[in-house]
Image: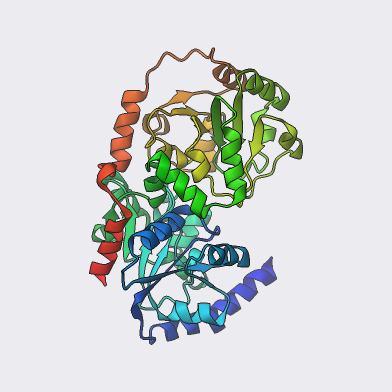
Amino acid sequence: MFMLKIKKLLFYIFIGYPIYIISFLIKRDHDLWLIGSKDGFRCNSKYYFISHINSSLNSKIKLYWIAKDKNTFNKLTALSLPCVYKYSIKGFIFLLKAKVYITSYGTQFDLSFWTSGNVFKCYLWHGVGIKNIGYLSKKENIRRMYHSKNIFNIVKYYPYREKPNLFLSTSPLMNKHFSEAFNIDKKNIFEGLYPRCEFLLSSKDDVASFINKYEDNEIKGIINQLKCYDKIYFYMPTWRSNKKNIFKFLNWNIEQLNDILIKNNAFLILKLHPMSEYEKSIIEYSNIMILNNNIDPYPILYYTDTLITDYSSVYFDYILLKNKELVLYPFDLEEYTNEEDDLAFDYKEYTPGIYIYTFHDLLEFIDGIYSNNEDSSRKINEIRNIFWGNYESKKSIQLKEKIEKSL
């Protein structure tokens, strides 16, 4: 581990930073834009990219996806989408020539910080929510990344402290939150709608057309399989660094859960964090599926009836969908809020829905006998307005126009 840190530091000093300095001397092509995501072809970058391609057929702007792996490159090439492999001569040249970088997580994660001199950087980001992030975080390792004045840490974390020229936010509350979290002026905040949420709000025919054109057979097969059931549950828990195998802490009886699902002709999809572990025997049950980490969950999320989550930002995306159920399953609420993460907003106040704390109550909920007399619909409408504002009038094309005007 120590040697890896030394090698990384040597790369920064002798290769990374020299390229970064040189990149400021390169003449940039204002019509060449690049976009990417650290997790392959997914997140807001994916949906902005496709939206841009479909709405800019006669535009002089050339937007290319920068693929960090060959599988993504081959997939997009097969779809005839403009794509360049990052670790190629062409990829390096494109990174040096492009004027605009568009990312979901940040230049250092999705594209390349070292080639970003004089680049216009637009962060689409990857989730609104109630967690402290960036400069606001109270976690020791995160504070060291953003606040340390130690010369070693400055060299090490400087790429992570970059300030985007434009940051996509969603409401006045989030504008303030992101401005403070990334230490950027509010004039650099653009209030809009996440591209992936624009997809979720599309008509049934448009979603079906999107999936047919851009998704692979695995996703199409899953969606087709879901048509056999009366109700689809989607469980997406937050990553917990001290609970890599979350099922050891959930205390679920998987066989009993599967029996209840069968009884109600229901199906449960589990979407775990890529670093999570799980008992492989779970995949043997007929009405339970663990979604592969390489699958984008959003096309599938559209066809679900109930989201079960805890502290994840997917909650706030899902409240945009009308006539859906929201179940909060914070089985470790006190421990999580005290030890695992620091929250920017009060959890229960800002995440209304059906609260379930035990496996027994979860079974009763699926079986339709769980006693929950509280109507949270009004509160959910309020939270929707607080986090998304006038979302129905916001489109990805507006962000494109803002970038063009800013160059």
Q: Residue at x 51, y 49 (%)?
A: 212
Task: Indicate left or right for 23 with 242 as reference.
Answer: left
The reply to whether residue 129 is visible in this rendering is no
209 and 173: which one is in front? Answer: 209
Q: Residue at x 68, y 68 (%)?
A: 2
Vertical arrangement, residue 40 with respect to residue 117, above or below: above
- Residue 91: image location, x then y, percent: 52, 77
Place residue 149 in its image quadrant: bottom left
- Residue 228: image location, x then y, percent: 60, 29
- Residue 46: image location, x then y, percent: 46, 57
138 and 231: which one is in front? Answer: 231
Vertical arrangement, residue 135 with respect to residue 102, above or below: above
The quarter of the image holding the C terminus is bottom left
Place residue 401 in its image quadrant: bottom left
Task: Indicate left or right for 250 with 387 as reference.
Answer: right
- Residue 380: image location, x then y, percent: 35, 29
Place residue 123 in its image quadrant: bottom left
Q: Residue at x 53, y 14 (%)?
A: 370
The mark tally for this picture is: 0
The reply to whether residue 321 is visible in this rendering is yes
Vertical arrangement, residue 223 with respect to residue 85, above or below: above
Vertical arrangement, residue 171 with respect to residue 187, above or below: above
How is the rendered protein coloured?
rainbow
The quarter of the image holding the N terminus is bottom right
